[in-house]
Image (spheres, rainbow, N blue to C red):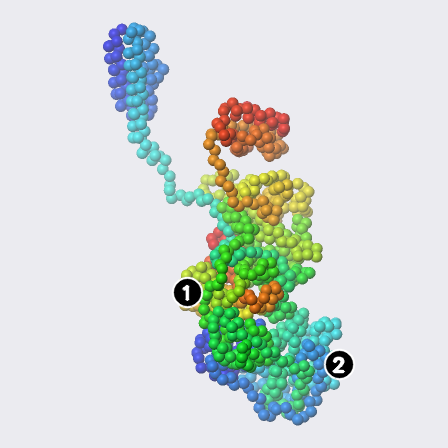
Amino acid sequence: MRVSLEWLREYVEVDVSLETLVERLHSIGLPVEQVERVGDDTVLDIELTANRPDCMSVLGVAREVALLLDRRLRPPVPKAAARPSAAAPRAAVEIADPEGCPRFTARVIEGVRVGPSPAHVQRRLEASGIRAINNVVDVTNYVMLELGQPMHAFDDDRIAGHRLVVRRASPGETLVTLDGVSRTLDGEMLVVADAEHAVGMAGIIGGADAEIGPATTTVLLEAAYWNPRSIGRTARHLGIRTEASARFERGTDPAGPPLAQDRAAALLQQWGAARVLRRMVDVYPGRLRRPAIRLRPTRTAAVLGIDIPKDTMVRILRALGCTVADGAPLRVRAPSFRPDLVREEDLIEEIARIHGYDRIPLTMPRGDTTPGTLVPVLLKDARIRETLARSGLTEVLTLTLEPAEAAAQGGIPPVVLQNPLVADQAALRTSLLPGLLDVLSGNASRRVEDVQVFELGRVFRAAQNARPAEQRSLGIAVMGRWRTGWNIPTDQAAADFFHLKGILEALLRDLGVREWQVAPLGPQDPWAGAERPWWHPARAAVLIVAGRVVGRFGELHADLSAARRLPHRAYVAEVDLESLLPMVVLVGAAPELPRYPAVERDIAVVSPDHLPAAAIEESIRAGAGPLLEALDLFDVYTGPPVPSGHRNLAYRLRLRDRDRTLTADEAEEIIRRVRIGLQENVGVQLRE
Amino acid sequence: MDLTVDLNRLREILNEAEQACARAATEAELDQVRIRYLGRQGAIPLAFRDLAQVPPADRPAMGAALNDLKAAVEALLQARAEALRRDSQPARLRTEAIDVTLPGRRPPLGRTHILTRTMEEIGQIFRGLGFAIVEGPEIVGDEENFERLNMPAYHPARDAQDSFYLGDGWLLRTHTTVVDVHVLDTRRPPMRAVAYGHCYRRDPVDASHSPMFHQVDGFMVDEGVRFSDLKGVLMAFAREFFGPEARVRFTPSYFPFTEPSAEMAVSCTNCGGRGCAVCKRSGWLEILGCGMFHPRVLEMARIDPEVYTAFAFGIGVERPAMLRHRIDDIRLFFDGDLRVLRQV
């Protein structure tokens, strides 16, 4: 709300500095966003909250200033000539929907000379952000800005039958509004109609048909009180917000329309723009009356934490325009221009607001202090983030909104936005991978080619007749060198499949997940068999925990990599945390340290390339039995003398009996069983 | 043979060996000495072979003397070897010189996102004040997000929370205050809870608006909870988060779900309250909205507002993080630019 200081001073004496005024206004909840010089005037741009329609006027702000500075408010008084004239109304009004329109006033003014309004009026309008048009339109805007009561002016010669009806629109009825737009209305919307058709959207915008023009000589002025909810609904459905609708939907003063009519008529007369004022028609079938609110001083103290004397409360409430009947409790009737004051708490807020929030002390809650807690799932999230950060990954947060086609990949039904802002934020992600690819390509385009990132967030899935599903998910993407520094050979620094797998292994270990397997990503997998597969078909895997696929990882498919112009091969993983988190054990028990030495033996296995290392490992473990404490692969070799199509895998076995020292003979016996097992189970030989 | 002569001969060998060791100037020369005395054809092994010709009666004495000689020579060689190594060490180590000004090879350091850390930090502070940190869904119903917070359909306050609708009455939560509703429904007073996470509003993107952003929301319900307690708790939070010198200011505001409502500002973190560009010369930074829960909100959760009172607050996470780390564009949080994320 833009308020001209010069205008404000017409209603209240302001004898403090501008700085003090701004500071004090802020302290009662009217923060001044900006102070602007306009010619000789100063304009305060006050940020109003939605509960204060009374302050959407210069008089309303003046009322608060008067209260703040303890000055007398001088409201405008219509001049004597504007008193309702004896002339017959010449306008008939019917309210067909009293719920939507509790009060409607109309006055016909004859002998109107349309022309510019006085210069000071034009200046005040423009300082308030409203364009001056002509004296008739300007007077409606001027009165709205002054008193907060929006008005509308019709060319009375265009009103068929000189009769107005406030009614619901018939579904599909159309109306061309002042802005030239043809609107199609529904049966809930209120219109002001003449004997033939709608001439205005009630409380929002007038119709183009009855617009005031240079040739207008008879004007019908409308001032009404509209049901706020009805105006709010129509304005939103039509997508219009006007100065009038903004006030009506917040709730104007039901007592306001006659005052506005008199003020407008008086002004037009003063400006020499009107000759005959006919009598005002005021249709107000069911008088709106504010109920009395019980206000308990004890409750006020209990809610605020400060004892404010009852006298002070009464003084504040009366200064706000309330009528207060003393007693215990106080019985308070709020003024008609304060629709926000309906409950005891509303009055308590007003008392606190005017008494001063800064006078309320700082206390700590009484009663038992309970220890704070954290839901376990957030604790697990935190552990995952910490472990991945220790592995050298940086956390990213990407928008969960993405293009619909990106969300549709992988065959998961996406949750689609009904009212997206832009097409590339039209659906909720079904996977973290598209966002992570954006991070890879975005960084690459900025010449950051070494990228190790993860995101922990939710993915979404549409559901039939139910709340769409949300799942916690973990995504990882690595590309380029993960170690930096001179003379580190590329093969030891570049991220590859096994770097990514190692990150996952370290994570699982840190989360206390002991039992898991990895298997090649099958072509049947929804993410592998899609038209645009995510992963390199021969370099991707599934992570299986407790017999269930909980994640997929591997080298990004070359097509995707090329489409995003990635400078290096990228490796990505996605893990469903909803499946994984139940297996997580955050508190590990310390191991019992061994008291007897271990025996280490190295073995080399020459095996065909197609035989998975997991099968060989499994065979070694089975053969070695419980005394095998650790099994480490330390070399993978292909090339002579290993026959082609084969590779040499070198393992170190650490054998230990926890209760005694293992002899060399016993170790040899274990190796012998391993050898036999490898021969019999997977058909490979130990190299001697 | 005469035992005395032979023993003299051994003494001579020892003297010669001692001189040879002393003369040896390098480890290679010392090796030659070792070969001359202890090698296969060396003087001492040869002397052991000659032992067969010594009269049996003299053999034990002669054998013992030979063993002593061998041990003595070995000791001489070892002492000299050590002396040589000691003398040559400085030179040898000099050849191993490195340029200590070459850059180090840094271990890869990752980090969590600045918004994650900010939310966790705020959560920790409130946890210390006895709050339970909880979470809730991002997709919610109109009733939870608005109606239960005293914002019926077409309420003007909804304008500030333009929502993304998903059909069937679902929408993306516009504030984490909706989690308060879930907690109010599932627990009984007294309770203190805080929730944080993504929120969504249909605002055009610019340097200070993102369709997705983060909030921390919290509330406390108990008998006798007062507005002054809200002030005290939030002051404790501000001191902890912004530093012990932080000052706070509460001014009236409006939220449909709180009554009275307030905005809390903290003295500008950049200028300390003197006024600067960051605080638009006001000396204050608005950082959160708060108030006493509206009795309707408690009633809708079947909590009697005559018995219980409650305060609630909501903090935008991006703004304090931007102030702290001097980030001037909210979009930097969400585009994964490692040049930024690795620094903050």
Q: Residue at x 24, y 13 (%)?
A: B8
Chain letter for the residue marked with disc 2 in the picture? A
Residue A196, label in figure: 2
- Circles 1 and 2 on the same chain: no
Amino acid identity at mark 2 = Glu
Amino acid identity at mark 1 = Gly
Q: In this view, does A559 lie above or below A202?
A: above
Residue sitting nearer the eye, A179 or A109: A109
Q: Which residue is drawn at 58% across and 60% down?
A: B188
The residue that mark 1 highlights is: B272
Q: In this view, does A126 lie above or below B24?
A: below
Give the quarter of the image for residue B36.
Answer: top left
Q: Is residue A670 above or below residue A251?
A: above
Secondary structure at numbered mark 1: loop
Give coordinates of residue B112: x percent, y percent.
Answer: 51, 51
Mark 2 burial class by Cα count in 10 Å: few <14, some 14-19, many 20+: few
Give coordinates of residue A548: x percent, y percent.
Answer: 64, 43
Q: Which residue is drawn at 59% across and 50% down?
A: A473
Query: Which image quarter is the C terminus of chain A in?
Result: top right
Residue sitting nearer the eye, A550 or A333: A333
Give coordinates of residue B275: x percent, y percent.
Answer: 43, 68
